[in-house]
Amino acid sequence: MHLLHQRGPLHDLPDTPEAYDAVLADVVEQALRRITPEGNLEHPDCHDDIGDTSLGITSLLVLAWQRGKDPRLPEAVRHSLAFFLRERVYTEDNPGYPNLRVRNSGLPYARYVLEAGAHPIGDWPSTVWALLQAVNILDTADGLVDDEQRAALVELAHGYWRWLTEATFFNPQEAGNQAIGCVVGGLALARHLPSAQGESVRERALTVYEREIRAHRVSDRGALLPPEHGGAYDNNYGPISLSFLARAHIVSGEDVFAEDGEALARYIDARLTGGGFDNGGPRYSEQHSAFESVLGLRYFGSRIGADIGRYRGDSRWARHAVKPDGGVDGHFAWMLVWQIQDTTPWHRTPSTTAVRHQLRAGGVSVAFDTKMTPAVVEADGTYYLPAAVNRQHGFGPVLDGFLLCRPMGEVRVRDLRADGLTAKLVTKPVVGRDHILRHVRSLYVTDGTRLWTTVAVERLDGAPYLLAGLPYAADDGDRVRRTAEGDVSSAGALRLTHPTGEGADHFDARSELSQQEAAFALAADPRGYGNPDEGWSHLVTSTALEADPAPGAPADLNVFVVRYGPGAEPLTAEFTGGRNGELTVRTEAFTAVIGDPAGDEHGEPELTLHA
């Protein structure tokens, strides 16, 4: 079974002018066939996310006319714009809308669902989207739209801005992408207003960004991020926020958007596997945006010198939003306009800078969470997630059902490259059920094809084992599919176990249920509104790789050695203890000396490595 939304890397989409002209030509032909006698360009099957869609198609027709001067388009643009101004501008409060600060303001807004009171909760983002569609038309319609329509569109856009920032609570869904999009709309609108009024709107937009968005950033993996639906990062919406930050910087030239965009881009680079797979988020775990992410990934990937375009997208939305029949939908049209207008080239080579929360070389990568526990391991095209045991999730030693991976103190990290090998040593103080402080030293070494993990901890009584991951997905090149297998070896006995319990809180990788579906089933709210990260945290047990201690370790240590990826030769592991807990590990591919858990004179981990 393939994962529906994780398909090809976004930097594989052709982005030449000719490719974009072909996309616009298809949009034009669909629009000219679809336009109604009244001038409506909405898809016939569109029900929700509809309030901005006709205007979005109009904006694409304007851009197509600007680029190709198709003589059929001026009349279609004027006709469709007249329809929108006449039929899709709402100034009476939507019954049931809960976020108003001023009732009966008379300011215009766009509806998420056209029927009054049917589903008003989505009106705020729909109005942001409509504002963006409107300013894109104002930016590109010179010589196409007459003065009367232009004036009406400027007035409408200004009314949208005031409704968003005066008549309602700002960003009521706590969605960073929507909030930054609103700021972009204000910054772009300001250029079309009289100078004093425009400067006022621009200053207001910058103030809103500083006070309502930047001041509320949340920390994850050492980065400050715009919160997304109550969490730090979401796979679908996080890269859309990055695109909004790119557009904000392009429109305003303000350094703050470049700084925050670069921080988010570096974060994405660190959490993303080399193959572009990722999962997790407070709104969607596996659903990925597509063309909506291209602008930000391309713009900021170039700025930070990293190939974040490897991010996998939903190729069904490769160019623009579509309905199930493949027909173009105007929702998100503004992002296609910006993507076409920006000519930043893709940066296609990986960053060589060692970063705390990522180990990456060749086809191997480990993305670490805030606590420096692997969040995703990639080797030989297979992706491993943290496994679950007794409601505890992660990679690490387990004794009597207790997982030793949550730090009780500072986590120290040492990165090293030597003899074609890339390594990261993580030293983590942990406390078990016996309240004894122990030091778990986890060494990750890769040659770019395989990954060796060596975990050493003070000897544990009983029958400890290493929870070594949940094999979850595999790379088919242009698609990611589900799997419950992986090429893994261990110096001690290795088992692949599956949960014996029943119910949604026991995840069996052999089932057809995806991680996202399982996470939503455990969430407190309905799918699309619940927090899948929170839901997934309720998982009790999962499919898991379990590795026993390697034989021959020093008497005072349990040492586990696991190799992910193909092995032409058997996995071997020999150990020599040294003073103060120093440990020498010899495998078939390298020799490493892991230093005293206390570290050097500054407490930092010590590591030597050679082939």
Image (spheres, rainbow, N blue to C red):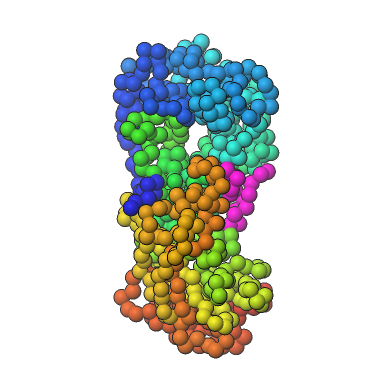
**Which residue appears at 55% of the width and 72% of the height?**
401
One can see residue 16 in this view: yes
Q: Residue furthest top?
A: 148
Q: Is residue 312 above or below residue 401?
A: above
Residue 230 is a magenta residue: yes
Residue nearest the observer in this picture, 394 or 499: 499
x then y, percent, for residue 312:
40, 49
Q: Position of residue 215 (x, y in %)?
A: 68, 43
> Does residue 225 lie above or below 63 as drawn?
below
Going 60% across and 45% down the picture, which residue do you hit? 230
Magenta range is: 215-232
Q: Can the viewer see residue 73 in this picture?
A: no
Q: Is residue 214 above or below residue 349?
A: above
Q: Using residue 370 as the reference point, say whether residue 313 is left or right of it.
A: left
Pick the quarter of the image with the C terminus. bottom left
Q: Left or right: 490 with respect to 255?
A: left
